[in-house]
Image (cartoon, grey):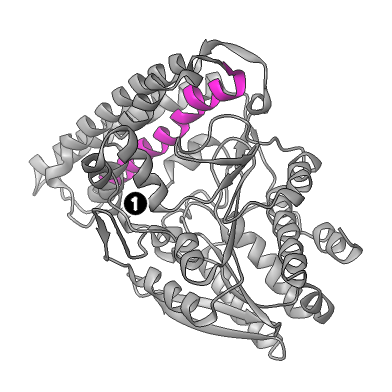
Amino acid sequence: MDAQFQALLRDIPDYDSFLTLDEMDASSRLLAAEHPESTTLMEIGRTREERPLLCLKIGSGPQNALMFGCPHPNEPIGAMMLEYLTKKLAEDENLRERLGYTWYFVKAWDADGYVKNEGWLKGPFNIYNYGRNFFRPAGFSQVDWTFPIDYKKLHFHNMLPETAAMRKLIDEIQPRFIYALHNSGFGGVYWYESEPTPEIYDELHKIPGRQQLPLSLGSAESPSCKANAPAIYQDLGIQEMYDYIEKYVGEDAAVRELNTGDCSAAYAYERYKTFTLLTELPYFFDPSIEDQRLADMTRLDVVRQKTAEIRVINEDLRSILALSKDYLSKDNPYVEAVADFSHDGSDAELNCAENDPAFLEKITYAEKLDELVIGKFYKMILYGMLIRANETELTNIDASLEPEKYAAVRKGFDAALAGFEKITAFLESNLNYQVVPIRKLIHVQLESGLWVIDYLKEKDQAK
């Protein structure tokens, strides 16, 4: 990596918190005003709650590139990376020439959802505060999973306004490169890519270690994931997920379980052969996520145990939701999310494990931790949203005028809080987690992008 890129990485500020949406929008407007020679601010659309979707256009390279933050609203690491990178690009003509693209940046794609996460963005940074103030919409309400799709028996055309705005931008600029700035909540670092890039795998693998972060060497995020290398996966669209469920459970199950559309990576690749990169990295990690020693369980043992435990948790979530659901507003976004994420969709994974001899092999400690402990982190946040589903209603109820409604919603709130505190206590006692400094997270995400940008440039020049 050349000196110019090294300087770019070295100058990343030591941020102590994440910016709010208003702070990011104000920063974008100021940047465009201060650098009219290099930077243009556009409004590419409006959100469902009528917030502007702002896009910065920087540079004038021969090909277009697109970076967007907050495709899921609880994922602001990429937004902070864009906050830093857009300023550097706007100021530095040499850097713009070195990178060579015309750039389009959307800092917060799911702006409405991002606002609902602002309760934890300024800290304190621990799993309790994160889960208690967390929001992520149901799959069919996610901006990066509602691109239209017609595949076999799956038909989805309920595009959100934010999705339609991004699709229009992609169609207009036909980008060579998209950086979809996702991040996970807990674990290690891993990547998704549209096409294999074996020439740079060694370099990508070195990046987390330089920031004292582990690779994610546990189980893949989805059992349908195809690994191109350790911690590097082939980008997944809805078709791959459909085929996996169809193979192990049947096509009717695939249609029933997949209630979303396709993603931007699949959409852009199919139409324009756009290369999309995702660098997934966590706010919290446990060093054991790298432990490659063999544990005392087979993969099949772990899948059976995980499936049984998650089904119990899902049933608990559904039973708590039932306590007050009839009294909660129909447009309550937390209700919609909890209902969507608490359904049981593990039959395909379990059937695969029961019929594949590879699952009789011993599992590593990293995979065991991922499946049996860290997996519950992603159920903890559902209890957090269930608390908020009831909490938002309680603020609008007059107990003296609606005693029955108040009692039901209060009962739902108390039960959700008890479930949240129980699972949080489990995580605290079974994890030795650390909080990752924001600067390190930005560094890993930015350096990964720089390696891929140079890889694509060399590949294109060799044609």
Range covered by the magenta-colored residues: 363-391
Q: Residue furthest right?
A: 3
Check residue 75 for magenta coloring.
no
Using the image as rendered, state which of residue 45 and residue 385 is in the foreground: 45
In the depicted structure, whether residue 443 falls above or below residue 86: above
In the depicted structure, whether residue 1 falls above or below residue 422: below
The spot of residue 249 in percent (x, y) is 28, 33
Instruction: Determine if residue 18 is in view.
Output: no
Q: According to the image, label 1 marks what residue?
A: 139
The spot of residue 43 in percent (x, y) is 48, 82
Using the image as rendered, state which of residue 345 and residue 111 is in the foreground: 345
In the depicted structure, whether residue 290 falls above or below residue 454: above
Q: Residue visible at 39% across and 45% down?
A: 241
- Looking at the rendered structure, the number of numbered marks drawn on it comes to 1
Q: Residue visible at 63% across and 14% down?
A: 294
The spot of residue 426 in percent (x, y) is 47, 21
CA neighbours of label 1 inside 10 A, class few (<14), some (14 to 19), many (20+): some
Q: Residue furthest front?
A: 463
Q: Residue furthest top?
A: 296
Look at the image and tell me in which quarter the N terminus lies.
bottom right
Please give left or right for residue 223 compared with residue 345 in the image: right
Please give left or right for residue 85 compared with residue 427 in the image: right
Please give left or right for residue 298 compared with residue 150 in the image: right
Q: Residue visible at 36% across and 23% down?
A: 307
Instruction: Determine if residue 36 is in view.
Output: yes
Badge 1 marks a residue whose secondary structure is: helix
Label 1 sits on what residue type?
Answer: Gly
